[in-house]
Image (cartoon, rainbow, N blue to C red):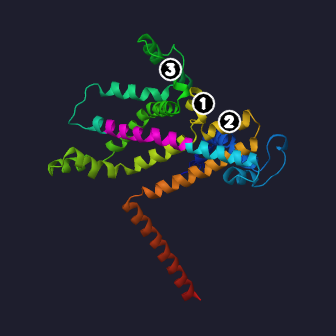
Amino acid sequence: MASAAQRRIKSISYAKYGYFFIAPFFLVYAFFQIWPLINTFILSVYGNGSEGDTFVGLQNFQTLLFGGDDRSARRIHAEFVRDFGNTLILWIGNFIPQILLSLLLAVWFTDSKLHIPGQGFFKVVMYLPNIITAVSVAALFMRFFSNSNMCLVNGLLTSAGKDAFMFEDNAAWSRAIVMFIQTWLWFGNTMIMMMSGILGINPSLFEAAAIDGATSGQVLRKVTLPLLRPMVVYTLITSMIGGLQMFDIPNLLVKNGGPNEIAKTVVMDISNGISGSADVGFAATESVVLFFVAGIIGIFLFKLMESDDDKEARANKKAQKKALKNAKKVQKCWQK
């Protein structure tokens, strides 16, 4: 029979020591994520420049979203609307080709019938741009597309006896280059995500479709895409959040946002407000607006892309909660 000391030793729980190992993560997260977020909300209700210590309430939000009577307020509102539109255009312009190319490659690489040689090599090469720093990417593409005669394209044009093309002075090319770079940077990562989603689908479904005589296109439309919806929704929402935060490539590649600031994003304006004009209040307000816009659009996309099975499961869960609540009410009435 075990003694009291032995029983006490056996009853000791070491689970509490796990908190000591995860505590550093929460401390770092709180210091670098939670506190800056809270501080941004605080700064958004204070003034700008010399009036940075003055509490202004929601005045910054009113000016940013609706403008005002004076010229300065109308200018700030117009610049925010323009920069927000630029951000959406740049994100949509790179996300659509990115998701289409990633889906196509993912389907090819996961199709056992194709037997593509060197799949591992191609996957690594396509993922490599995702780990290259933005500065290196901007420097690389400036060697291809810039106003200088030293860039590759203009070097070929001048050697052929033609005039150099002013890429940086052309609005359409400024946007197109940024969209292309963003697509090139992220399609490899998206392809890996799509491949993981396809490989997670039960192979028996593809086998059953093949036995029934379904073509590759029918399998893609009727089996792969419907079951890949959760991964597509995840990719869409994370890409949207990253797109709203787009800063490094446009800022490094296109000087001052390009002609007519056609490639200037909201985060570039936030950076200018903090480091340039000292409009910290407006910069914080723009950050808060982006925070809520990302949240609202993310929830909307999640609801929009939700499958019928998920809707039915949520409805059943809600009905069960309601039935349980009613049962408790009836029980209380009987007890009285």
Who comes first in sequence, dot 1 or dot 2?
1
Total number of numbered discs in the rendering: 3
Label 1–label 2 contact, CB within 8 A? yes
The amino acid marked with disc number 1 is Asn
- For mark 2, does the 10 Å Cα neighbourhood hold few (<14), some (14 to 19), or many (20 or more) residues? some
Span colored in magenta? 86-106
Q: Residue at x 70, y 45 (%)?
A: 76
**In 3D space, how far apart are the residues under numbered discs 3 and 2 (Cα atoms)?**
24 Å
Who comes first in sequence, dot 3 or dot 1?
3
Q: Which mark is residue 271?
A: 2
Element on which disc 2 rests: helix
Q: Is residue 285 above or below residue 28?
A: below
- Residue at the spot of label 1: 251
Q: Residue at x 33, y 43 (%)?
A: 198
Q: Position of residue 211 (x, y in %)?
A: 15, 49
Who comes first in sequence, dot 3 or dot 2?
3
- Closest to the observer: 232 or 249? 249
**In 3D space, how far apart are the residues under numbered discs 1 and 2 (Cα atoms)?**
10 Å
Q: Position of residue 10 (x, y in %)?
A: 56, 49
- Residue at the spot of label 3: 140
